[in-house]
Image (cartoon, grey):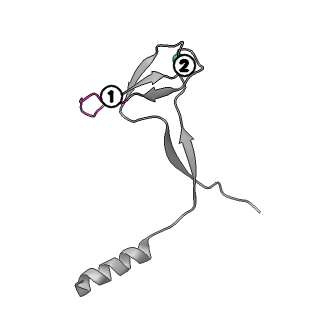
Amino acid sequence: MEMVDFLSKLKEKRMEERKEVKPIKVDYKCPKCDNGYLRTYGTVLTSYPPQYPHKCNNLKCDYVQNFSITYPYIDYEPEPIKYE
Ligand SMILES: [Zn+2]
C-alpha cells in the first residue's frame, strides 16, 4: 500500500462514527382487507426503476400493488436517547 493511501485510510478510520442502532422490521399491511400483508411473488417489472409486484398473503384477498422496494425489509433507527 502506498504511504499516501495508508494515511488517508488512517484518517478515514479516525473520522468514522459508530452508533448503536435498533433494527426494525417494516411491513406493509393490505389496504383492502386490513388483515394480510403484501408479499412479493418472484416477479420483477423491468421498468425504471424496477417495480416489484406484491400480493396480499390473505388467501381470500386478491389485492396487488407495485413498489420500487420489497416488503418486508429491515430498517435501522438510532437508539432512543436515554435520560438519566
Ligand atoms: Zn388483503
Q: Is residue 33 above or below residue 28?
A: above
Determine whether 22 is above or below 11 in the image. Answer: above
The local crowd at label 2, few if under 14, some if 14 to 19, many if 20 or more residues have their Cα within 10 Å, is: some
Q: Which residue is mark 2?
A: 58
Quarter of the figure with the N terminus: bottom left
Give the farthest residue toward the right.
Answer: 84
Cα gap from disc 1 to disc 2, whole angstroms = 18 Å
Give the farthest residue toward the bottom: 3
Q: Is mark 2 within 8 Å of ligand 1?
A: yes
Q: Quadrant of the C terminus?
A: bottom right
Disc number placed over residue 43 in the picture, else none:
1
Give percent across and percent down for residue 2.
22, 84
Q: Residues within 10 Å of mark 1 (few under 14, many from 20)?
A: few
Toward the viewer: 3 or 45? 45
Magenta residue check for 47: yes
Q: Nearer the viewer, residue 4 or 55?
A: 55
- For the residue labelled by badge 2, is the local secondary structure a helix, a strand or a loop? loop
Going 29% across and 83% down the picture, which residue do you hit?
6
Q: Is residue 65 left or right of residue 57?
A: left
Measured as percent of width and height from the top left, residue 23 is found at 56, 50
Left or right: 31 as drawn, with respect to 42: right
Specify start and end residues of the magenta stretch as a single range: 42-50
Which amino acid type is shown beneath numbered disc 1?
A: Thr
